Amino acid sequence: MSIKILKLAKSALKTPGIFAGGVAFGTVGFKLLASKEAKKGYSLALSKIYKAKDEIDNTISNVKQHTDDVVADAKDLYEKEKQESNLLSIGEE
């Protein structure tokens, strides 16, 4: 199958119409990408991406804050339990 495709591509490149069509398509595509309307669209899309990034950063920051609170509470509980177990072990002696 790939040999057939290669032969077809080779024969297509021999015809000047296909080559000219490819050049024309590339030129028109470049002009469309460089137009003012396209640039406005790119800018709008990028602004939406930046907005989403900011929202994700805020969410991550909130999660980190809550996680830090939980870790601090856990450390406090651990220290209290440790002190209580030390007091109990001293009382048993």
Image (tube, rainbow, N blue to C red):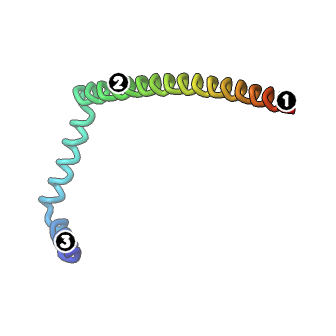
Q: Residues within 10 Å of mark 2 (few under 14, many from 20)?
A: few
**Mark 3 is on which residue type?**
Ile
Q: Residue at x 24, y 30 (%)?
A: 38
Q: Does residue 23 appear left or right of residue 84 in this picture?
A: left
Q: Does residue 87 appear left or right of residue 55 in this picture?
A: right
Residue position for label 1: 90
User: Quadrant of residue 88 in the image?
Assistant: top right
Check whether the beta carbons of the residues at disc 3 and disc 2 lie within 8 A of each other.
no
Image location (x, y in percent) of residue 79? 72, 26
Q: Residue at x 22, y 44 (%)?
A: 27
Residue position for label 3: 5
User: Quadrant of residue 72 in the image?
Assistant: top right
Residue position for label 2: 47
Separation (CA) of disc 1 from disc 2: 64 Å
Separation (CA) of disc 3 from disc 2: 42 Å
Q: Is residue 32 above or below residue 18?
A: above
User: Quadrant of residue 93 in the image?
Assistant: top right
Q: Residue at x 62, y 23 (%)?
A: 73
Which image quarter holds the N terminus? bottom left
Image location (x, y in percent) of residue 49? 36, 29
